[in-house]
């Protein structure tokens, strides 16, 4: 065993294959590859957290989520490296990218699905990659992290509405006022519900961090391509702006409005 063989460095360091002669394409490739590596770990930890919740191992699940939160911070901070890419530099190799786009990142889609932003239509993008397609199908059809959390709360005796527990998990969860009331009670009586109250706040952190990543993506895209349409066929900045309205855990944010009223 050696450093290089253990880490498969030969494979890893042989995987940067610029398609243009432009100096800055290396930055673009490595920024994406490091993001994909971290996404791999986010997925690994999130799936484990879901399994642990299903097994009533809340404390261990929270340990996984704590790690995910640190990775998210790294992913968000990393945007500053790519922000050194000027529009002129990017334009030199952008035409070589064809229709390639972040839309095709199956690991990103897997994380979105695991956190609850289900979108069956997105599977089509991955039809040519059976392994990715299989992982996404499995996650689409499985309860999300939030579903697992709510089922856990139900097993603990909290009055989670039956229709929430038996919902069609292949679709994104939608705000449920009855659920908001249950969660508001946990917040109002935090001292008596301390561990689940803390768990709720961990989920809020997770969503907050996810949104910060989305926001930095949007701002980086804005400074690099302005209002150009995306290589993936979307409107670009407008599309990314819309994604900022998405929420994984709507009731945990709705609780904020209810507290004290
Ligand atoms: C100069 C750098 C970048 C530009 C100009 C850019 C631009 C865009 C645009 C315009 C879209 C919308 C889809 C489309 O029409 O193509 C998009 C989506 C996406 N990008 Fe980027 N991007 C950049 C860097 C990155 C990086 C470093 C990542 C990290 C993995 C990334 C991940 C994604 C993902 C996952 C999506 C899909 C988002 C969703 O479906 O909600 N992008 N990007
Ligand atoms: N959608 C970007 C292209 C892009 O960013 C990209 C292209 C190939 C591989 C990954 C990419 N990253 C994220 O969207 C654009 O419109 O310029």
Image (cartoon, rainbow, N blue to C red):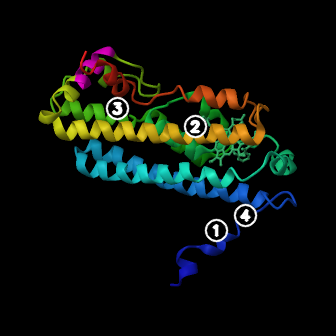
Name the residue at 65% across, 75% down: 10
Distance (Cα) linking label 4 and label 1? 8 Å
What are the residue bounds of the magenta stretch?
A: 177-184
Q: Main secondary structure of the magenta part?
A: helix
Q: Are marks 4 and 2 in contact (CB under 8 Å)?
A: no
Query: Ligand 2, what quadrant?
Result: top right
Estimate the x, y position of residue 133 in percent, counting from the top left.
58, 42
User: Spatial distance from mark 4 to mark 2, Cα to Cα?
Assistant: 27 Å
Decide: marks 4, 1 in contact (CB < 8 A)? no
- The residue carrying pointer 2 sits among few (fewer than 14), some (14 to 19) or many (20 or more) residues within 10 Å by Cα, namely some
Quick one: label 4, few (<14), some, or many (20+) residues within 10 Å? some
**Residue 217 seen in this snapshot:** yes
Give me the disc on residue 86. none
Q: Nearer the viewer, mark 4 or mark 3?
A: 4
- Judging by the rendered image, the residue that carries numbered circle 2 is 215
Disc number placed over residue 16 in the picture, else none: 4
């Amino acid at each position: 065993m050696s450093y290089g063989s253990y880490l498969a460095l030969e494979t890893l360091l042989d995987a940067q294959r610029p398609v243009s002669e432009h100096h800055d394409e290396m930055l673009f490739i490595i920024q994406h590859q490091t993001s994909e590596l971290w996404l791999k770990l986010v997925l690994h930890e999130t799936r484990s957290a879901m399994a642990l919740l299903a097994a009533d191992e809340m404390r261990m699940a929270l340990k996984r989520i704590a790690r995910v939160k640190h990775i998210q911070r790294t992913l968000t901070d990393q945007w500053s490296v790519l922000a050194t890419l000027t529009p002129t530099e990017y334009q030199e190799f952008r035409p070589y990218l064809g229709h390639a786009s972040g839309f095709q990142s199956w690991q990103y889609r897997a994380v979105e699905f695991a956190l609850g932003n289900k979108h069956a239509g997105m599977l089509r993008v991955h039809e040519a990659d059976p392994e990715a397609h299989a992982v996404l199908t499995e996650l689409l059809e499985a309860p999300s992290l939030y579903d697992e959390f709510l089922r856990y709360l139900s097993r603990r005796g909290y009055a989670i509405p039956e229709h929430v527990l038996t919902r069609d998990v292949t679709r994104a969860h939608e705000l449920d006022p009855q659920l908001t009331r249950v969660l508001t009670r946990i917040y109002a009586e935090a001292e008596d519900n301390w561990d689940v109250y803390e768990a709720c706040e961990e989920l809020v952190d997770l969503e907050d961090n996810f949104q910060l990543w989305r926001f930095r993506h949007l701002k980086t895209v804005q400074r690099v391509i302005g209002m150009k349409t995306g290589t993936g066929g979307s409107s670009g900045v407008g599309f990314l702006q819309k994604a900022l309205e998405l929420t994984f855990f709507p009731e945990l944010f709705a609780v904020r409005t209810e507290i004290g009223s």
